[in-house]
């Protein structure tokens, strides 16, 4: 298994430092796929939608990295969610706004594509009301399923 390059690790860590609370390694979900980046991004969006979520944006996050001298790469943040859930949660718990919608960082590494996201179970550290735990658990299960599908699609490639 290849290790992350220093530059790619910095890119992923830079994105996650935007969060207001520190995450531990067990708060992250990660997958590696043999799919080329463009195909992986398309398949990720399809899997997200197949799980009943709406993709709200796909943002490049390498623009500032390239400006610092890093070679141009393929880095995106895919944001998604169920609009009614996100709106309701943000209105009731404004401290959750930096974490919404859900996000997956996707980036190319050599001949593979990596997917990294913060596990939704982490959100119970921010808004821990018992009625929210089933939603966080469902989100985590769905993300686990999505990431597993990306691994499988890459294995068949």
Image (cartoon, rainbow, N blue to C red):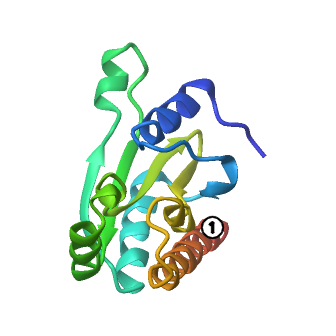
The residue closer to the viewer here, 10 or 157, is: 10
Residue appearing at x 22%, y 81% in the figure? 84
Residue 33 seen in render: no
Q: Quadrant of the C terminus?
A: bottom right
Label 1: which secondary element: helix
Asked if 115 appears above or below 130 in the picture, the reply is above
89 vs 151, left or right, is left
Q: Quadrant for residue 5, please give it.
A: top right
Asked if 141 appears above or below 111 in the picture, the reply is below
Residue 116 image position (x, y, % from top left): 54, 53
32 vs 61, left or right, is right
Which residue is under mark 1? 151
The residue closer to the viewer here, 102 or 107, is: 102
Residue 24 image position (x, y, % from top left): 65, 47
The residue closer to the viewer here, 113 or 116, is: 116
Mark 1: few/some/many CA within 10 Å (<14, 14-19, 20+): many
76 vs 141, left or right, is left
């Amino acid at each position: 298994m290849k290790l992350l390059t220093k530059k790619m690790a910095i890119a992923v860590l830079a994105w996650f430092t935007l969060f207001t609370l520190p995450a531990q390694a067990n708060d992250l979900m990660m997958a590696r796929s043999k799919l080329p980046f463009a195909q992986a991004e398309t398949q990720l969006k399809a899997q997200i939608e197949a799980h009943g979520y709406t993709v709200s944006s796909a943002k490049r996050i390498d623009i500032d990295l390239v400006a610092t001298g890093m070679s141009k790469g393929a880095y995106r943040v895919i944001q998604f969610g169920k609009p009614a859930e996100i709106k309701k949660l943000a209105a009731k718990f404004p401290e959750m706004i930096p974490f919404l919608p859900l996000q997956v960082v996707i980036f190319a590494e050599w001949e593979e594509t990596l997917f990294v996201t913060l596990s939704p179970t982490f959100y119970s550290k921010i808004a821990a009301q018992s009625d929210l735990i089933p939603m966080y658990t469902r989100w985590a299960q769905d993300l686990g399923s999505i990431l597993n599908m990306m691994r499988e699609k890459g294995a068949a490639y």
